[in-house]
Amino acid sequence: MEKTINITLKVWRQRGPKENGAFETFQLKNISTDSSFLEMLDVLNEQLVSEQKEPIVFDHDCREGICGMCSLYINGHAHGPDEDVTTCQLHMRKFKDGETITVEPWRSASFPVIRDLMVDRNAFDKIIQAGGYTSVNTGGVPDANSIPISKIDADEAMDAASCIGCGACVAACKNGSAMLFVSAKVSQLALLPQGRVEAAARVKKMVAKMDELGFGNCTNTRACEAECPKNVSIANIARMNREFICAKLKD
């Protein structure tokens, strides 16, 4: 038999980046515990539309934990109280019957609110663009072992590349730092020979763009690592710092 719960939702509503926002309270009854958090929000929006009220704006795309667009701050946690999942992978079974759930957008000056729960994360795209490209001529499909890479380096590069750029690290950090995101993007190339050609220029440009966009600095509280849905390690931050210092020393 399907289990259902009744919940109270406190949702942040804001009409635009330059307007003041406030919480609105909603009651939802008979929500299936097997439904995802976004499916629950879909139910709420259907209810609001039926009442001829404006639905809540929130970001989503793949709903498979791949794109990172489902960036919600739920009960004081980026992506919610469950570990190692994005919001779209969070299920209502994690909440109790009668519970009050607070839903907010990412809180960062570098991620201005577009409307309600949707924020502008173009700052991450600008940092990626600042890093540029690799100049390795790939040509056709190369043999898998044409460039020897140790398994340790390959595994660490893949772990860094698992970052989906959702912004949970920024939302969780008391300084609004993007260093976990930037260091993951630096590491996934710095660990591989194909990425070494522009390594020095890349890390300097990405760090400079990060500072320009107003992100804070890291103070090693590890909140970013704790909230990251893909378990990206802060060891990448140490690697980025080493890459950056070596690049500046070469200058």
Image: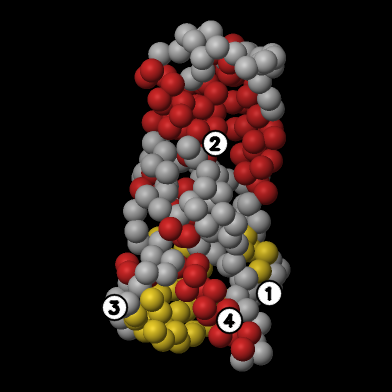
Q: Is residue 224 left or right of residue 141?
A: left
Mark 3–mark 2 Cα distance, whole angstroms, equals 46 Å
Which residue matches tag 1?
A: 15
**Residue 237: percent from the left, percent from the top?**
45, 32
In this orientation, which residue lies closer to the viewer: 212 or 195?
195
Q: Amino acid at mark 4?
A: Glu
Q: Helix, strand, or loop for circle 2?
A: helix
**Residue 155: percent from the left, percent from the top?**
40, 25
In this orientation, which residue lies closer to the viewer: 226 or 3?
3
Mark 4–mark 1 Cα distance, whole angstroms, equals 19 Å
Vertical arrangement, residue 178 with respect to residue 18, above or below: above
Mark whose residue sits in front, 4 or 1 = 4
Residue 156 is tagged as none
Vertical arrangement, residue 78 with respect to residue 51, above or below: above
Going from N to C along the chain, the mark reached first, 1 or 2, is: 1
Q: Amino acid at mark 3?
A: Met
Mark whose residue sits in front, 2 or 4 = 4
Mark 1–mark 2 Cα distance, whole angstroms, equals 30 Å
In this orientation, which residue lies closer to the viewer: 218 or 49?
49
Mark 2–mark 4 Cα distance, whole angstroms, equals 38 Å
Q: Helix, strand, or loop for circle 3?
A: loop
Which residue matches tag 4?
A: 46
Q: Disc 3, disc 4: CB below 8 Å?
A: no
Which residue matches tag 3?
A: 1
Q: Helix, strand, or loop for circle 4?
A: helix
**Residue 116: percent from the left, percent from the top?**
61, 71
